[in-house]
Image: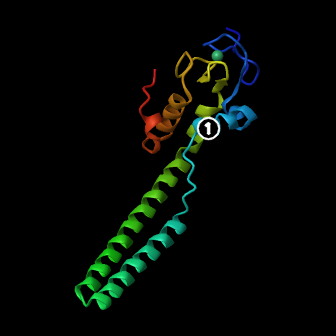
Amino acid sequence: MTNGEANGPVTCPGCQTRENVSVAEARTDKRGRREDLTTRLASAPNHTGDGCIHFCEGIVLAFVAGAAGKYFADERHLPWLTAVGAVVAVLIVVATIAIVRGETRDARRVRAGASRADALTAEARYCSTCQGVFYPSGHPWPGIVTPEHFRHHVWTAAGYGDQLDPKAKATELP
Ligand SMILES: [Zn+2]
């Protein structure tokens, strides 16, 4: 094996060509963007969900539920609808807090695992011929695997495998 260089050209164990780039490079180059490798080879979930925005949405929904209850109570002369609206509003607030807390916790776990994920990504290479990922060292696996396998491995090892999408989660590591 001549796969000593960390960043030099290395031979793919799948097709024996050297048409491969580092995973970091594959995510951002033109072909990678076209094939959505930015997402498929991501080493962490993309937490675009802003906790504050979700919180505000929840409060607005709760307010709407409360106001709707009050409105229809007056309109239909059904005073108990005010109570129903209030109960629904409270449930929405409780659910919103639970969701925002969960998101915050998920994001914190991703930050905590970032260095582990980076370490696992640093050596990985993407072969465009095989459309898969391999490690020149042969660790943690010797052959080539799909981007979903790779994602499964990195996210699980970094401690947030539960945040994988169902497709990646369903993959079995070799
Ligand atoms: Zn290959």
Looking at this view, name the residue that lies furthest to the top: 1
- Residue 85 at x, y percent in the picture: 31, 80
Q: Image point 54% across, 68% down: which residue?
A: 53
Left or right of residue 9, residue 95 in this image: left
Residue in the picture at 61% in, 13% down: 13
Specify the quadrant of the image occupied by residue 137. top right
In the image, residue 17 lies at what x, y percent?
70, 12
Question: Height in image: 94 above or below 71?
Answer: above
Indicate the quadrant containing the N terminus: top left, top right, bottom left or bottom right: top right
| Colour scheme of the rendered structure | rainbow
Give ligand 1's quarter of the image. top right
Q: Which residue corresponds to the image point at 28% horizontal and 87% vertical from the top-left?
A: 76
Dot 1 falls on a residue whose secondary structure is: helix
> Taking 134 as reference, is 151 above or below it?
below
Q: Position of residue 174 (x, y in %)?
A: 46, 20
Residue 42, by quadrant, is top right
Q: What residue is at 47 percent from the left and 41 percent from the top?
A: 164
* Residue 146 horizontal/vertical position (percent): 54, 25
Q: Is residue 76 left or right of residue 169?
A: left
For disc 1, does the CB lie below 8 Å from ligand 1?
Answer: no
The residue sitting at the front extreme is 76
Left or right of residue 166, residue 37 in this image:
right
Residue at which label 1 appears: 118
Within 10 Å of the Cα at label 1, are there few (<14), some (14-19), or many (20+) other Cα atoms?
Answer: some
**Dot 1 amino acid type:** Asp
Above or below, comparing residue 125 to residue 35 in the picture = above
Q: Nearer the viewer, residue 53 or 108?
A: 53
Relative vertical location of residue 2 with respect to residue 44 in this rendering, above or below: above
